[in-house]
Amino acid sequence: MIKDSPVAKIVVSEKPDDDILRMVAEFVKARGCYKTEYIIDPDILGGIIIRIGDKVYDGSVRSRLETVRRAL
């Protein structure tokens, strides 16, 4: 039910273009979420972080750099 669906919080480093907005909408809908809230946060350096309820999908550049740093 759309009324009770969670809000997907999407964190990006800059305003996304129409293609990204469309891909994110498809991604969150496939996970039962029909509402989105975008947050601009330049600290993630690039990429995207999507939070739906207690699930976090982290594709940020900052996260990837941290993973590389820990591996070294």
Image: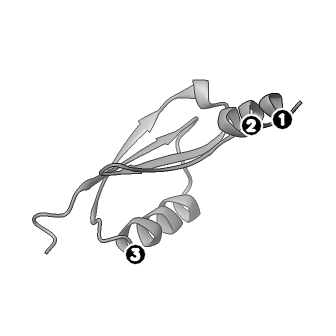
Going 84% across and 35% down the picture, which residue do you hit? 71
Quadrant of res 5: bottom left
Q: Amino acid at mark 2?
A: Thr
Q: Amino acid at mark 3?
A: Ala
Kindly report the distance in space between the C-alpha atoms of the residues bearing marks 2 and 3: 27 Å
Residue 30 is marked as 3
Going 13% across and 75% down the picture, which residue do you hit? 1
Q: Residue furthest top?
A: 43
Which residue bears the numbered disc 1? 71
Going 58% across and 27% down the picture, which residue do you hit? 42
Tell me where residue 11 appears, x and y as whole percent: 47, 40
Going 73% across and 40% down the picture, which residue do you hit? 64
Tell me where residue 58 appears, x and y as whole percent: 56, 47
Lateral position of residue 55 relative to residue 64, left or right: left
Q: Which mark is nearer the camera, 2 or 1?
A: 1
Which residue bears the numbered disc 2? 67
Quadrant of res 38: top left
The mark nearer the N terminus, 2 or 3, is 3
